[in-house]
Amino acid sequence: MAQILGAGGQPIGGQNEEVEIPLEKTTSIACNKCGGEVFVQGFGFRKISKLLTGKPKDEVLPVELFLCGECGEVLNEVLPPGLKVEQE
């Protein structure tokens, strides 16, 4: 899975690695459906059975998603491995 970097090449998600990568050395990621290059953040939710957690109730796990700003397609490239859709 690709690591998501913020502005200036800094990793998102609390990682403290110092990385300086010029943006002109990178390539853009486009939507597989429409070619759009702007994505919006969203969340999907997964239910976890109480049988798996050993807790008295089922739990809900939020999963961060990035959706194409043009067509709404989920950006598969940054999904966790268990949720990625295999490309044909």
Image (cartoon, rainbow, N blue to C red):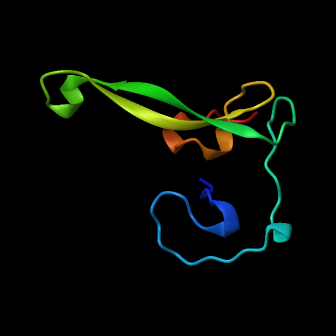
* Image quadrant assignment for residue 55: top left
Judge left or right: residue 14 versus residue 36.
left
Quadrant assignment for the C terminus: top right
Residue 75, image x, y percentages = 68, 37
Vertical relation: 40 (above or below) 72: below
* Image quadrant assignment for residue 21: bottom right
Judge left or right: residue 33 versus residue 86.
right
- At 72% across and 27% down in the image, what residue appears? 73
Residue 28, image x, y percentages = 82, 53
Judge left or right: residue 61 versus residue 41.
left
Vertical relation: 54 (above or below) 21: above
Residue 39, image x, y percentages = 72, 39
Pick whichever, 72 or 7, lies toward us: 7
Vertical relation: 9 (above or below) 40: below
- At 45% across and 62% down in the image, what residue appears? 14
Residue 35, image x, y percentages = 87, 36
- At 69% across and 68% down in the image, what residue appears? 8
Q: How many marks?
A: 0
- At 37% across and 32% down in the image, what residue appears? 61
The residue at the far front in this view is 7
* Image quadrant assignment for residue 10: bottom right
